[in-house]
Image (cartoon, coloured by chain):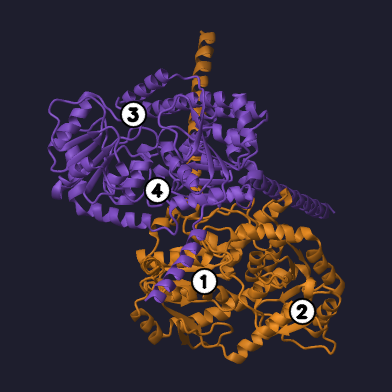
Chain colours: A orange, B purple
């Protein structure tokens, strides 16, 4: 027995040694992270944390006035002063939060959306300037000898810093307005089946929808010029080169796209795009005792999880009353991220919280439905855990997102402006009691979770790849060396048409000449 | 001590149990494999074997008269009679092998290549007919209730069987002539930077090269019609539907492409394309004692590995003499797959073999250079093990392949028709003694081998995915529902131009009318 025990011991020791060698953290690289505020940061933090846990040295640049970006034990942060004060940010945020509940005329909606976006990016570009022209800080960054810049090209700071420091960039994003991501990465997006931002179309369009989408793809190009004018100006001024922002982000080594085709419509991709949609979803952890008790108390009816995202935790009193009323009419218990005014008669089945453990709640077996604004984070968590949704899009890409989910038959869309207690109760009853929603969602969830590598592992791998090989030049398409005319072979087509024209004209002239000579001869003969 | 030993034993036992559960073979699925003869089979066999080792039940369909497809202990085979006899195949193969060493006029070359391809596919289509109209066999296949068909769409048999049996198909291929693979999978291939078959261009083209490539992309479309006419006819006759072969293969669930961007030029991809270039490369195994002795005896000079692929193991006597002479002039030892006539004065440093353990030899530290015909299998093994190459393209895609390798600066191209002992020695000396070749090759090799998952694991995973989910519909682009005009939005552009024309004409007419009225009034006034 002793001998056998020793043999087992020796065997297992060797096995453990081998395992620990195999699972050892990577040789520490140096990663500079330039995040984008808001929910953008929430999923990038997952990768920053993953890289830190692999033994890399991470430095995150944080604006002094910020909303969600906070320090962590795992990585260093470097705070830089910005022009906007905490009060100004708070006021601006409040205005924004109130704005999303105000109905605007249908045609004005897109103008308001663009206005909001321009306002947001304007503030951020200012913040970016404060960083770029902060010479002591930039000098410090230069001296840190980073291996890679991890950033979201939604804002210009990260890509410009990467260019200024001569470092390869890894992008982490869902997308950039105007489809600038696809333009910059030279990725084809045929307007015949790739629906444009806010087009309201799916990938299967009627002739009229295709016309609309085609026109919108042209409008996008014009919008881009306006929207990114300040980015272009900053980039060319700071880098002292005649360069557009599109060109700058076109230099990125790897695009970690928060894409998955259980949510997005299938479309062409480029070799340096790595799909990591759902990176924020993880196995649900245990809930706090208090929350677990509330959840368990829901019995067979289960719970409804309700959040309108990281930026909107409150709403006008009258709007909130609709939700409270609706919740009093359903048998489920509701966990709601809500910090707004509380009416006197809050139903007993509602638990208001400052911050929801959203992923853990959705992963709980009692989760029956998810009321969401349709941000991609929530949607991926919903798909990952297989929970049907009632969706209330508020701004930005959310209208498109909820449309995608609804066409899959796994969720119902309501308008935040037209919502009533009855429509909300109806929608909840539909997704909870019509079993087809749950069935389709479970199928979608099974496909989403069936991937050869977990998104986080993939993201970590490719970031380390860029560090190991100082970029990913072998994945860079030669299309970057062509201008628009050349890329679409329009110069070649023009040249060939010109040749055809010349040849046709020459042939015609020759024939005419021959004809005339023949005529003359026969006339002469007649005269003779 | 006893206690500690037991603890270790218990721990390791649990660990092993967990490991064995984790590494357990998949629940056996049923896979029907319809391979393509020649080197195509050599790499597909790697996947068939991998699937069998995972516990799947594999049936490989084998034509009675075959070259390389053989049975294995790991999978079942089903032989089907074909019209061509062993003697006919042997004669045809001999004619082909002799043909590749005959020089043809430059312009005739492409005609000969296409002729050869048509001849080859013609024979294979006949074989395919023998299989499809073999009713007892087809009935048997139907009754086997397969989960998936694994096939190479280079030939029509597999995709047609998959359609006939209503099964999802997984494709395993490098490519299909005429770019039919990209057409069928709806993958954009802009002619401005994606070089066409035998264009002789890289992805960075001059204006003239772009014109040539553009014209060739048009020629391809016409060539395709001719080449695949027999495939179209067979598909629509057998399936009794008005369908083209392109449409049939467009239904494939997953495209396992033997692509890697250390070899191919970066280009757009589709979501259902999985890149498994280099799947045939593996860690080199030990050589036989005899070969190992020969290799070791090469001393500091090392060895040269020489093979012209699975189909060409012989050559005309005069041609062989050039190689023997060249090898007598170099200090390296040469291992040559050669079954042709042997001269009297074979140099001592040359070992002729019927079949080379090519991968193991290239993976040997003594390997200094690789003389190859430029088939993708050999090239990937060369890149994988980091061995610079001297390349002698013979037929098919080999001209394009060697061009790709040469532009990476890791190999030298020679013409099999113009080769002399001196040029060969020069080429070998260059790739062996000019250290820049080895350096570039090592860099390329490092990038090629730095992938998040091994190609075989990836191929197995996605084949199992298709079995688990009965296809991969979520990756199928909506472009499949559009015709050529719609896909390129030409109908939309035409409609918009029409509207612009109408509006312009109407505006013009209105203005003309107003003008005329104004004129009349002023005239009247004058008259008054």
Query: Residue at label 3?
Result: B106
Q: Secondary structure at mark 1?
A: loop
Query: Residue at label 1?
Result: A152
Q: Secondary structure at mark 4?
A: loop
Q: Secondary structure at mark 3?
A: helix
Q: Is residue A525 above or below residue B206?
A: above
Query: Residue at label 2?
Result: A297
Of B494 and B234, the residue lying toward us: B234
The x and y percentages for residue A191 are: 62, 53
Spatial distance from mark 4 to mark 1, Cα to Cα?
Answer: 33 Å
Q: Residue furthest top?
A: A528
Query: Residue at label 4?
Result: B278
The x and y percentages for residue B467 are: 59, 47
**Residue A180 seen in the current view:** yes
- Counting every numbered tag in the picture gives 4
Q: Please report the residue visible at 20 percent of the width from the left and 39 percent of the height from the top.
A: B334
């Amino acid at each position: 027995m002793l001998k056998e025990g020793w043999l087992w011991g020796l065997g297992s020791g060797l096995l453990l040694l081998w395992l620990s060698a195999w699972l050892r953290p990577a040789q520490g690289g140096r990663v500079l992270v330039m995040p984008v505020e808001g929910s953008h940061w929430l999923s990038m933090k997952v990768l920053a944390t993953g890289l830190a846990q692999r033994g890399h040295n991470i430095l995150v640049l944080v604006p002094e006035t910020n909303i969600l970006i906070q320090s962590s034990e795992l990585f260093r942060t470097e705070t830089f002063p910005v022009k906007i004060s905490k009060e100004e940010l708070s006021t601006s945020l409040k205005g924004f939060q109130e704005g999303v509940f105000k109905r605007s005329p249908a045609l004005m909606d897109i103008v308001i959306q663009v206005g909001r976006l321009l306002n947001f990016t304007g503030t951020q570009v200012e913040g970016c300037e404060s960083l770029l022209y902060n010479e002591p800080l930039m000098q410090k960054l230069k001296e840190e000898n980073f291996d890679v810049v991890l950033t979201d090209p939604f804002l210009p700071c990260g890509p410009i810093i990467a260019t200024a420091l001569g470092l390869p960039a890894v992008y982490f994003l869902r997308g950039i307005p105007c489809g600038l991501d696809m333009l910059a990465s030279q990725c084809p997006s045929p307007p015949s089946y790739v629906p444009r931002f806010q087009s309201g179309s799916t990938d299967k369009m009627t002739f009229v929808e295709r016309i609309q989408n085609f026109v919108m793809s042209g409008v996008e190009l014009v919008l881009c010029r306006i929207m990114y004018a300040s980015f272009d100006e900053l980039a060319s001024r700071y880098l002292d080169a005649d360069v557009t922002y599109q060109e700058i982000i076109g230099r990125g080594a790897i695009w970690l796209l928060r894409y998955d085709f259980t949510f997005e419509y299938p479309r062409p991709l480029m070799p340096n795009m790595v799909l990591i949609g759902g990176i924020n979803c993880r196995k649900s952890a245990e809930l706090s005792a208090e929350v677990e008790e509330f959840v368990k108390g829901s019995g067979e009816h289960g719970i409804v999880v309700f959040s309108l995202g990281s930026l909107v935790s409150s709403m006008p009193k009258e709007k909130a009353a609709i939700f409270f009323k609706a919740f009093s009419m359903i048998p489920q218990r509701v966990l709601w991220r809500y910090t707004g005014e509380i009416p006197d008669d809050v139903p007993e089945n509602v638990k208001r919280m400052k911050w929801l453990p959203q992923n853990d709640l959705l992963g709980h077996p009692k989760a029956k439905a998810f009321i969401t604004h349709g941000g991609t984070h929530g949607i991926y968590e919903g798909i990952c855990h297989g929970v049907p949704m009632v969706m209330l899009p508020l701004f930005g890409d959310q209208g498109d997102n909820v449309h995608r989910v609804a066409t899959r038959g796994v969720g119902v869309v309501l308008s935040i402006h037209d919502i009533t207690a009855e429509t909300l109760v109806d929608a909840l009853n539909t997704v909870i009691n019509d079993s087809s929603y749950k069935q389709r969602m479970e199928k979608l969830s099974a496909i989403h979770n069936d991937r050869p590598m977990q998104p986080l592992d993939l993201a970590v791998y490719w970031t380390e790849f860029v560090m190991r090989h100082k970029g990913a030049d072998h994945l860079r398409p030669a299309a970057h060396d062509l201008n628009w005319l050349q890329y679409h072979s329009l110069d070649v087509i023009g040249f060939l048409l010109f040749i055809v024209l010349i040849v046709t004209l020459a042939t015609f002239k020759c024939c005419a000449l021959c004809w005339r000579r023949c005529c003359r001869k026969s006339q002469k003969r007649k005269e003779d």
